[in-house]
């Protein structure tokens, strides 16, 4: 049987990784703020990265609360996953209306990069609420995908923006 305590080391590692990457995104934004603001889609991408990485930070932190019932953590996971899905979606809808230059394929890729990580987290929340510890494996998938997306976005905000 899977217990929450079995995942403590993973959650501790993800708190550190997501905090570091969130800080890096903030630094990238502050270093290149004028350049970011000159591209209509980049402020939204920066915000999406902050939502995903901040979501991982909050999720992993919530999972470390001692003696928390798995079902309660499932509710927290579901709420965080929904925020991680809906906030970037809202940002993208606004951004895509304002920026008619992006192709449909680029819009789809951007949507998948931000929605992809949150959907396993939503599913994990539902499983954990039902008392099914295998939801932690979905959390792992969502967290790792969020970190990948965060690194890719940070690359764009730090390096690609200067090309």
Image (spheres, grey):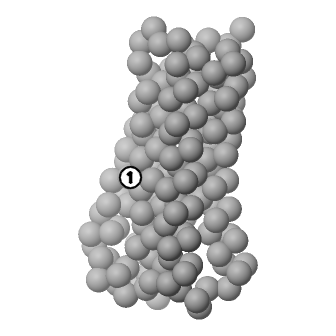
Residue drawn at the location 38% of the way across and 61% of the way down: 25
Q: Residue furthest bottom?
A: 101
Residue drawn at the location 56% of the way across and 71% of the way down: 93
Depicted 59 relative to depicted 92: above or below: above
Q: Is residue 136 left or right of residue 63?
A: right
Q: Percent position (x, y) of residue 36? A: 37, 79
Residue beneath disc 1: 22
Q: Is residue 27 left or right of residue 6?
A: left
For the N terminus, which image quadrant? top right
Depicted 137 relative to depicted 102: above or below: above
Depicted 112 relative to depicted 10: above or below: below
| Residue 151 seen in render | no
In the foreground, 57 or 31: 57
Q: How many marks?
A: 1
In the foreground, 8 or 45: 45
Give the image quarter of residue 140.
top right
Q: Secondary structure at mark 1?
A: helix
Depicted 120 relative to depicted 33: above or below: above
Q: Percent position (x, y) of residue 138? A: 68, 34
In the foreground, 12 or 136: 136
Residue drawn at the location 45% of the way across and 70% of the way down: 44
Give the image quarter of residue 86.
bottom right
In the foreground, 96 or 47: 96
């Amino acid at each position: 049987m899977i217990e929450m305590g079995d995942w403590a080391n993973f959650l501790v590692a993800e708190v550190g990784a997501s905090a570091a990457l969130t800080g890096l995104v903030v630094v990238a934004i502050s270093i290149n703020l004028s350049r970011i603001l000159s591209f209509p889609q980049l402020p939204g991408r920066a915000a999406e990265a902050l939502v995903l990485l901040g979501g991982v930070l909050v999720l992993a932190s919530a999972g470390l609360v001692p003696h928390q019932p798995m079902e309660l953590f499932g509710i927290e996971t579901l709420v965080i996953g929904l925020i991680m899905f809906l906030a970037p979606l809202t940002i993208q809808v606004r951004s895509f209306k304002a920026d008619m230059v992006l192709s449909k394929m680029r819009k789809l890729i951007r949507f998948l990069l931000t929605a992809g990580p949150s959907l396993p987290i939503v599913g994990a929340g539902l499983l954990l609420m039902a008392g099914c510890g295998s939801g932690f494996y979905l959390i792992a998938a969502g967290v790792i995908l969020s970190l990948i997306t965060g690194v890719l976005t940070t690359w764009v905000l730090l390096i690609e923006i200067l090309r």
